[in-house]
Amino acid sequence: MRRRAFLAAAGALSVGGLSASIANSRLAVQTPPDPAYTILSGTKHETEVFVRNRGDGPTALVVGGMHGDEKSGYRAATAITRWQVSGGTLVVLPKANQAAIRANRREGENGDLNRKFPTGETPETELARAIWGVVSRHDPDVLLDLHRSIGIYGYHESSVGQVIWPTDAGRASDHAKRTAERLNDAVVPWSMPLHEFRLGGEITGSRPMLVHKFAGDLGRPGYIFETTAFLLDLGTRVRWTKRAAEELLSHHGIERRRNS
Ligand SMILES: [Zn+2]
């Protein structure tokens, strides 16, 4: 085959491959998630919970949208509602704070939702109590809370970007460290050293956050995941957030099935 003809054929092949992969991703998107239920139905906080049950095994709860302006967290969590898992139960609350999401603001009308979960006490708002009710109902072995910071931890003031914060339970710290290393190898370009994921200090229940309460009240592995808006577009943040969730869930025995 002459070079030009070969290139034309190769081009046609790659275009065919591309359209096949688009068709596959459309199929994946159209696969309906398992039945959901709704918390706080009929209120402005009404929001859905998705449950994938694949028999015996651990249960994980993934939460997005605690802060309404952190799109990567709730978009990644929404994509995760469609994942098929090889075993265990995957529960997803993709849009925890619907009112704040609609307003595209960090806080809802009752302030910062992720400051309403004191350890050893009842959560402080109706929405926080309903979210803790999801925890109580499913009794998860592991909890992931997906967030986005503005900047980079240790570089921009008050920023916590690109850090995975584990609870002080089980091997959570090990799993967070290995997940950070995996993400740095797999997705963070070598030319962006500031964006390398890092292990955060252990979460102990000392602050009134959802994952802190999970650590303080239940003593189980949980993680706050923080990507950053600094130099990353939304699509990249969503991809890296999904990848982090996939790695962390895998450490806890919940494997995402390919093509889901
Ligand atoms: Zn946040």
Image (cartoon, grey):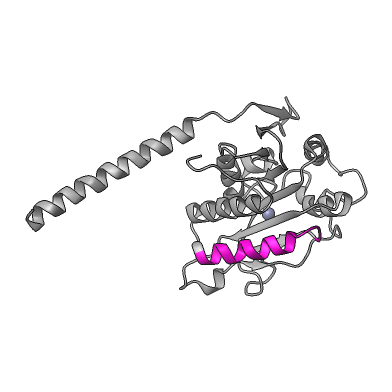
Residue 219 is at least partly visible in this image:
yes
Viewer-nearest residue: 206 or 217: 217
Residue shown at 65%/70% (left/top)? 153
Q: Is residue 163 above or below residue 19?
A: below
Viewer-nearest residue: 16 or 126: 16
- Where does residue 181 sit, x and y in percent of width and height? 59, 67
Q: Is residue 154 above or below residue 79?
A: below
Q: Residue furthest front?
A: 56
- Where does residue 137 sit, x and y in percent of width and height? 80, 34
Viewer-nearest residue: 57 or 125: 57
Q: Is residue 210 magenta?
A: no
Left or right of 257 on screen, residue 109: right
- Where does residue 132 sit, x and y in percent of width and height? 81, 40
Residue shown at 77%/36% (left/top)? 138
In the image, the segment drawn in magenta is 168-185
User: Which picture quadrant has residue 44?
Assistant: top right
Residue shown at 63%/51% (left/top)? 250
